[in-house]
Each structure stands twice: as C-alpha cells, then as structure tokens.
Amino acid sequence: MSVCPALETSAESVGAWRILPMRHGAVLLELADLKQTLALYDALCRQNLAGIREIIPAARTVMIEFDPALLSLETLATTLRGLDTAETASQAGACIEIPVRYDGEDLSDVAEVLNMSPEEVVRRHTGHDYLVAFTGFAPGFAYLAEGDPRLVVPRRKSPRTLVPAGSVGLAGAFSGIYPKASPGGWQLIGTTPLALFDIDRQPAALLQPGQRVRFVDMAKDAAYAVQGDGRETSFSKRATAPGAQPGNAIEVLSVGLPVLFQDLGRAGLVAQGISRSGAADRESLKAANRLVGNPAETAALEITLGGFSFRMRGQGVMAVAGALVEITITTAAGGVIKAPHHAAVALEEGDSVTLSSATVGLRAYLALRGGFDIAPVLASRSTDMLAQIGPEPLKAGEVVAIANAPSGSPVALAETPAFVMPRAGEVVTLDIVFGPRTDWFTEASVTRFLSQEWAVSAQSSRVGIRLEGEALERKVTGELPSEATLRGAIQVPASGQPVLFLVDHPLTGGYPVIGNVAGHHLDLAGQIPPGARIRFRAAAPFAPHFLQGQP
C-alpha cells in the first residue's frame, strides 16, 4: 500500500480501491459502483473482524470506523486485500410490499424530464423489485437501488423546506421514502401510509440493508391491507423506570434553551439509519458522573448556555461540569450559598438550585447521584434533536425522579477539566485531518480554509456549527453521491460556507467533506459558543492510498 499524492484518477489507480482518510481510526473506501460497494459490505460483515466499530455503506463508498488499539490500518488493508467479494449473501425473508398513492407534486415534472407519461412512470416504478442498498439521512430512510434503469432523475435544484412523512421520491438512480416530515430535495412521485420508523417496533426501521422491496399502486389495488399507522418519529414521553427511590426527585422551575438528557449515545444502530448522538462534550459528562459516584455512561442533563433552575425533593448529591456557570443554592430557610463548579455538592429537601448563563463554554452537564429515573429509548437515554429520538426536552413544572445509587459507589474528590473552555470573541484552534474530499476543492480554497478565522454563527446546534468566512470554491462541480459522515466532519455545501458536524449529524451526506476534526478536539468543538472564531490546523497534507489488487 503506497501513498499516492496525485489526486486525479491515474493508470496506477485503475483496478484499485482508493482509501480516503477521515481521521485516526476511520477511513472511507471508494469503489467503482454500488454493486462493488454492497459486495464489500457483505464480505466485511461476514468477516466479523475484531476491532471494527461501525461499517456504513453508501452509493460508491464504504466507511469503516475501527479501534486503532485493536486493529491497525495496515492489518485492515491486508484483510481487505484477501476478502472474497465474489459472493453476496441474499437477505432472507419475503419481499416487502409498499403501497403507494401516486399523487406526488413532482410526478408530472419527472414524466416530462424522462419523456414519458405519468402512467408510464408509475408502471415502471411498480414493475421492479428494489434492493435496500444502505440507510442514512434520517432514521428509517433507505436508499432503494436496482429499479428501472429509465427512472434516473436529478434532485430538485431547490430543496423543499418540508417534505411530508411517507413521501416517495426519486433522486439519481435511487428511490426512497421519507419516514418523517423533514427538508429534502428528492423528486416526489407519491405517498405511502406505512410507518417506516417506529420505536415501538423491533427493529424500529421497517427497511434493512439487503432486503427487497416492491411498490404497489394503491389505485389498482384498493383492497390492499395497510399495516402501520403512518405516524412520524417523535420524542418519547418520559416513562419512569423501576428502582426509583421514593421522594428523591427534582422539580424543574425554569428552562432557557432546551435542556436535554444525554448519555454516551446509541452504538450499533447505523443499519437502521440511527446515529450515535449522546453528549456533545463526553469528557465533561463523564467528569460530572464521576464526581457523584455514577458510572461514566449515566444520563445527565445537558444545559446549553445555562439559565436553568430546579428545586430538590428529598436529598441528593449533584455536580456540574463543562461550561462555566455560577451555581446558586437557596435553602428552604432562605439562606443563599454559592456552590463550586466541578465538585460534588449535597442537596437537602427544598433547596432551589439556579445555574446562571454560561460565561465560558457552551454546554454544562448536571449529574445527580444515582442518575435520573427515566426509561431508555433504543438502549439510550440520549435525546437526538435531528432524528427526534429519545426523551423529550424538559419543561418547567416537571418532576423527574432520581434512581438509587449503587451501594458503595465512590465519589471523585477532584476532577480537572479536560481542556480550557472557549469564550465568545476568542479564536479556537482545532486540529483536523484532511479528507475524504479535500481534492474536490481548488488549491487556493484549501489554503484559504486553513489561513482564515471562521466566525461561529448563532445558527448553530447539536447538529452542527455553521461557519462564516470567505467562501470555498470547488474544483469538482458534479453532484457527490451520498456517503457516510462522522462527528467532526467539515462539510461544504454549495454556498461555500462550511458546517462542522456535531453529535446529532446525519449518517450520510451529499456535500463534500474537506476535513474532519481530530478525535482529541471533538469535545472542544462541542463547547465552542456563538461569537467565537475557529482556525483549523492540519498536521499533514491530504494523502489518499490505493489498495492494489482489487477489481
């Protein structure tokens, strides 16, 4: 395996897979087509190689995230060379039928572009069995391949701000169904009443990679039995889990920006289009939990920009880590106490706790000894704001119970913050790894990306940080087939203004990623407030590899 500085396809690369860097422990394999992609994905799944954390296939790429302590890139490359991709295992089970009302807003336009009648579009759309190739964009959203080769249309030039749940669309050579109402740029040709994603179903996503799908025209089969209620993905009402200690709870008095339950997220659900999510600053979450004697993965409250207050019912021990906020305790007798940050603090019946606006950093983490007594959603108590999965945000007036602490669990006497929290107005330097699509940009843009200070927009969220600066120009102007993205990916849409993805990012994206934030700076990125500026620093040039000997 040799580093190839040439960014264009060359004779050396013919017949080889290109390995594109993402960051330490993650690579993107670029292949010839979807058939090769699915064959590699299937072979990797059958190999069950120790150290691989996630595998995400897309249109012409496979993202492999792995543990470098268990699996080196060299060992991975050797394994890839030896994989048998000649045979692809077929998904067991019957073909899933999707009833469709062909009433989409774009059906006539699609027919005109394809030089056929709307009836011919419907006939061709229902005349093939589709393969669930991969998932992404949103939980339950599946990219359906191997349809009629005539039904190839570009995405809309201007995406809709809201596509109704159940909409059936076309984009490129793929068909897809929107599981929930969301923005989208696919050409809409119909709607289905089926629920594509339901957290009360096992698995939650109706369509899984490898399955077969057939569309059925409901106008020709009115007696079709529809299963599912068509409801959208939404936050879960909080359900109390067993084991609460009676009388120990917090009563929410006031909330500023959404206050969310967060733990370390949901792993292993990418096949259903569900990303990990979890705390935006995981080290601060762990620190708050250690201070009160909880396991590191226990759910705590993520409080953005401060401005939160609650009253203690019963007794408890709390700790606040992350963004610097002033912590004021008003006792039931009227006494006022200033509590320390990054320390365990005992609370008594009737104590009112107020967290001021954050002066440094963005997100504070409030942990209670024993943890909050809420039921998990898909094996996690995290709230994913993009996917709308998990417990709904807190509201004033709610009472949330506190669970029992494990017997003898030790508290930490001191915790040192993992890094200095950033301030508005300051310049924050983030280390990055170039790739996977650095070569889609002009050399001048790559230089400009590193040389300028990017302003952090107020229009930022857990999904991503919107950056403002001198726009980046692309060298490759074509449409990028959807491919996997990571937390920390710096994606550049058509505007040329980058977006730095955070924990609630989509699993796949259709805009090129110029680089990825290095792993040791991911938590820092989650604490950068609006008004700060970011400068990116790359340790090395963009260096794709070619894995020789592959078809």
Image: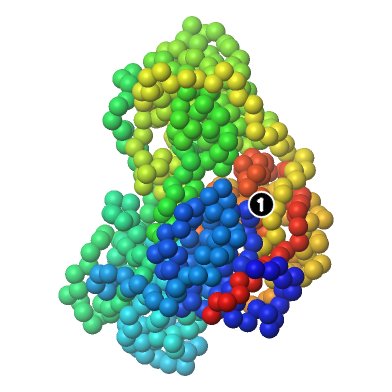
Residue 478 appears at what percent x and percent y? 64, 77
Q: Nearer the viewer, residue 211 or 115?
A: 211
Residue found at x 49% / y 43%: 278
Is the residue 377 above or below the residue 482 in the image? above
Q: How is the image coloured?
A: rainbow
Snapshot quadrant of residue 156: bottom right
Q: Is 88 positioned to the left or the right of 32 in the image?
A: left
Is the residue 447 above or below the residue 423 in the image? below
Q: Nearer the viewer, residue 9 or 217?
A: 9
Residue 467 appears at what percent x and percent y? 70, 54
- Whether residue 174 appears in this view of the structure is no
Labels in figure, total: 1
Is the residue 145 above or below the residue 113 in the image? above
Q: Nearer the viewer, residue 26 or 344?
A: 26
Q: Is 422 positioned to the left or the right of 171 in the image?
A: right
Q: Which residue is farthest bottom? A: 115
Q: Which residue is mark 1?
A: 517
Classify mark 1: residues with Cα within 10 Å, few (<14), some (14-19) or many (20+). Answer: many
In which quadrant will I find the N terminus?
bottom right
Is the residue 243 above or below the residue 48 in the image? above
Q: Secondary structure at mark 1?
A: strand
Residue found at x 76% / y 61%: 541
Residue 310 appears at what percent x and percent y? 48, 24
Q: Is 224 positioned to the left or the right of 263 in the image?
A: left
- Whether residue 539 appears in this view of the structure is yes
Residue found at x 45% / y 12%: 348
Residue 411 appears at what percent x and percent y? 50, 20
Residue found at x 81% / y 62%: 447
The amino acid pointed to by label 1 is Val
